[in-house]
Image: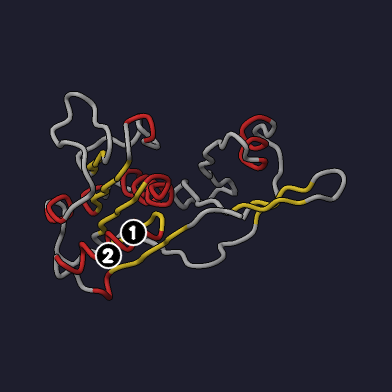
Amino acid sequence: MVRLTAADGYTATRSYSVASPPDDSQDIEITVERLEDGEVSSYLHEVVVPGDELEVRGPIGGWFVWRGDTPALLVGGGSGIVPLMAMLRLARRSGRSDLVRLVASVRSPVELYYAEELPGPETTVVFTREAPPSWDRPPGRLGEEDLRRVLAPGATAYVCGSSGFADHVTGLLARLEFPDEHIRVERFGPTS
């Protein structure tokens, strides 16, 4: 949770996921989508500079942790890729990217978070509405076959996205007979 307090005492609080892998530093990275009318996102994009201090607390609510030493299937929808990126970064940094498979579901190439950093042998991108011309999979909703290709024995699935996306993915995993006890879900909804 990031809370901003104006000089007149007005406060605004928003929830963000950590995008940086765990390490010994005091720094954390969050990814903030700038919303046109977003009072917090606009402030974070246009006013805050490196070195500024922000009021942060948490984690609060439901979250999951991957320690980097077991097989993991990471499935994110839209901005749901943010906490999964922390896991992918940890796997790459520790030389254990063989343990992870990340599936990112996104509407179009311009909406793909971490577009420059994401590509690799452990990642799959599913475009749901518009795909690049040379893409080998036509646009469409994430399906069973997309997940079947990346399932690893003994993996834990980490699913992050909107409630509808999370429900869809957990349904796909159930149809693939993925064990319920190996599914972790972080869902989010609109802010008020």
Residue 90 rendering spot, x and y as whole percentages: 37, 49
Q: Position of residue 72 (x, y in %)?
A: 26, 58
Residue type highlighted by circle 2: Thr
User: Which residue type does callout 1 highlight?
Assistant: Val
User: Which quadrant holds residue 116?
Assistant: top left
Give 47 or 143, whichever is nearer the viewer: 143
Residue, far top: 133
Question: What label sits on residue 77 in the rendered view?
Answer: none
Which disc, if any, is residue 170?
2
Residue in view at x 32 percent, y 34 percent: 108
Q: Which residue is at the front of the view, 64 or 42?
A: 42
Q: CA distance from mark 2 to mark 1?
A: 8 Å
According to the image, label 1 marks what residue? 159
Q: Position of residue 173 (x, y in %)?
A: 21, 64
Mark 2 and 1 residues: CB-CB less than 8 Å, in contact?
yes
Q: Earlier in the sequence, mark 2 or mark 1?
A: 1
112 or 23, which is in the foreground? 112
Which one is in front in this view, the residue at disc 2 or the one at disc 1? 2
Residue at 37% x, 29% y: name it: 110
Position of 139 relative to 88 (above/below): above
